[in-house]
């Protein structure tokens, strides 16, 4: 029994680390999210530290990966072998601005042990373009260097950061463009978009003119955020779903063929070698009003459901996929958050199709009528399908602060948190441990395999 409790504790934390970002959700505030997450991180770090560190090798979100790294580095006396390699490997995958914020938090907390200094120095040394970092993340880079008592290998970058008046000009093109951009408008178009944006405002350049000229230096995400034409052919599945849902209905209809083809191509890329291997699949997809998310995560739950729809279509055998939206709509391209959440009724419809796999993507707030989904699943599992011929998994994109987990539908149905639709296949795999038929030893063995694979892929 103690092993099952331990496994449940760890899976609870993994669900939170996948879904919770410390931001406002439909039913909880940002403060509630942060308080709930802080408790979970402390509880799992103290009681299951090796597993806590191993979570860095899983598909958790960047917010929680940075928190795990911070908490591990704050407590060096409790460190387990191999933690440093895991932290370093995960930091290499995080966005630079998030890593610099992490280093800033460690500096503010006075965390400056030998392991921390080694990890910070190694990460800084591995940056591909220190001059670009000096321009784009100037404050964070200066603070990190001071914290570990280091200076950039390049003297020009060092002067730019710590003695900006020492040089009349720089040999490095990026550093010199930043110097000239203070008085020369043309120079700002040689800078990264986020830096150039500030200079454009300073010089009073019209927004449309600035965006037109800076376009060649913008990343795909920057083009998407500024509503410029996005390259749909390379966009990840969930981000593509968010892009589609942000378009007006008329534009979705007008571009139906283009958008549908892009979503299906992204789903095929995410499915990889598993495409067409899942047999008969039915999906219950939540497009109720709560799928609208919050002001800071607009339509995120609905975007995850839309991405899962196209991914499940790719994973199922050809012609063997049945999608059922809670609203009753049958046009995935025109879904929008509306109405209650009749999960129980849709699950009955889905089971009636005789699937080999049933995947439910919902925040778990079954309310039309309340509790029907849990009762349907209980009766199905205990009386109608005790041999588990049909695999049922619930994927939940929303963290529930009160339960310190994602909201579940029934004890007999494994539930996993999901943030990006492209992680669906891996999350269905880890959800098997939530059925209560495997213990902590099996879960640890699974995590050990993931860590080994993660470190192998991260090795130079």
Image (tube, rainbow, N blue to C red):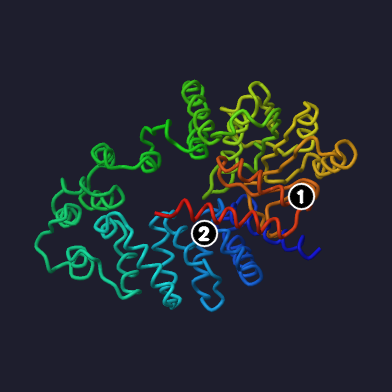
- The residue nearer to you, when weighing 350 against 243, is 350
Taking the image as shown, residue 127 lies to the left or right of residue 376, namely left
> Which residue is farthest left?
168
Taking the image as shown, residue 150 lies to the left or right of residue 290, namely left
- The residue nearer to you, when weighing 292 against 359, is 359
Taking the image as shown, residue 189 lies to the left or right of residue 405, namely left
- The residue nearer to you, when weighing 54 against 232, is 54
Q: Residue at x 48, y 32 (%)?
A: 247
- The residue nearer to you, when weighing 311 against 153, is 153
Q: Which residue is mark 2?
A: 65
Q: Which residue is mark 1?
A: 435
Q: Check disc 1: other Cα within 10 Å, few if <14, some if 14-19, many if 20+.
A: some
Counting from the top left corner in percent of width and height, residue 96 is at 38, 57
Q: Residue at x 54, y 79 (%)?
A: 77
Q: SS class of the residue under badge 1?
A: helix
Taking the image as shown, residue 235 lies to the left or right of residue 443, namely left
> Which residue is farthest right?
383
Query: Decide: marks 2, 1 in contact (CB < 8 A)?
Result: no
Whole-angstrom CA distance, mark 2 to mark 1, is 26 Å
In the depicted structure, whether residue 389 falls above or below residue 98: above
Counting from the top left corner in percent of width and height, residue 245 is at 52, 34
Mark nearest the camera among 2 and 1 is 1
């Amino acid at each position: 029994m103690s092993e099952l409790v331990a496994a449940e504790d760890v899976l609870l934390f993994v669900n939170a680390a996948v879904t919770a970002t410390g931001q406002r959700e439909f039913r909880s505030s940002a403060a509630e999210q942060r308080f709930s997450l802080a408790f979970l991180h402390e509880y799992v770090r103290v009681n299951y530290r090796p597993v806590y560190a191993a979570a860095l090798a899983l598909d958790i979100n960047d917010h929680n990966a940075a928190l795990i790294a911070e908490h591990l580095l704050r407590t060096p006396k409790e460190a387990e072998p191999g933690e440093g390699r895991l932290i370093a490997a995960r930091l290499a995958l995080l966005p630079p601005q998030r890593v610099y914020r992490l280093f800033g938090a460690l500096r503010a907390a006075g965390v400056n042990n030998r392991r921390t200094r080694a990890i910070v120095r190694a990460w800084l040394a591995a940056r591909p373009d220190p001059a670009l970092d000096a321009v784009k993340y100037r404050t964070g880079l200066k603070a990190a260097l001071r914290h570990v008592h280091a200076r950039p290998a390049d003297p020009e970058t060092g002067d730019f950061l710590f003695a900006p008046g020492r040089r009349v000009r720089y040999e490095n093109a990026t550093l010199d463009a930043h110097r000239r951009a203070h008085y020369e408008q043309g120079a700002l178009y040689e800078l990264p978009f986020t830096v150039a944006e500030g200079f454009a405002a300073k010089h009073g350049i019209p927004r449309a003119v600035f965006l037109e000229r800076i376009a060649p230096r913008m990343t795909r995400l920057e083009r998407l955020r500024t509503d410029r034409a996005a390259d749909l052919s390379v966009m990840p599945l969930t981000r593509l779903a968010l892009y589609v849902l942000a378009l007006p209905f008329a534009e979705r209809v007008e571009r139906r063929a283009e958008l549908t083809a892009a979503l299906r191509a992204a789903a095929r890329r995410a499915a990889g070698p598993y495409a067409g291997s899942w047999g008969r699949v039915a999906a219950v997809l939540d497009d109720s009003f709560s799928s609208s998310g919050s002001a800071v995560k607009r339509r995120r739950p609905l975007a995850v459901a839309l991405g899962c729809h196209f991914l499940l279509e790719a994973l199922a055998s050809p012609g063997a996929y049945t999608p059922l939206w809670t609203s009753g709509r049958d046009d995935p391209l025109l879904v929008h958050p509306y109405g209650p959440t009749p999960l129980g009724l849709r699950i009955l419809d889905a089971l009636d199709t005789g699937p080999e796999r049933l995947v439910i993507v919902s925040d778990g707030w079954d309310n039309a009528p309340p509790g029907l989904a849990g009762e349907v699943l209980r009766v199905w599992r205990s009386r109608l399908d005790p041999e588990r011929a049909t695999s049922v998994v619930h994927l939940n994109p929303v963290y529930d602060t009160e339960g310190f987990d994602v909201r579940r539908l029934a004890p007999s149905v494994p539930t996993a948190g999901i943030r990006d639709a492209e992680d669906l296949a891996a999350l269905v795999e880890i959800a098997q441990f939530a059925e209560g038929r495997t213990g902590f030893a099996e879960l640890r063995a699974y995590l050990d395999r993931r860590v080994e694979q993660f470190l192998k892929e991260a090795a130079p």
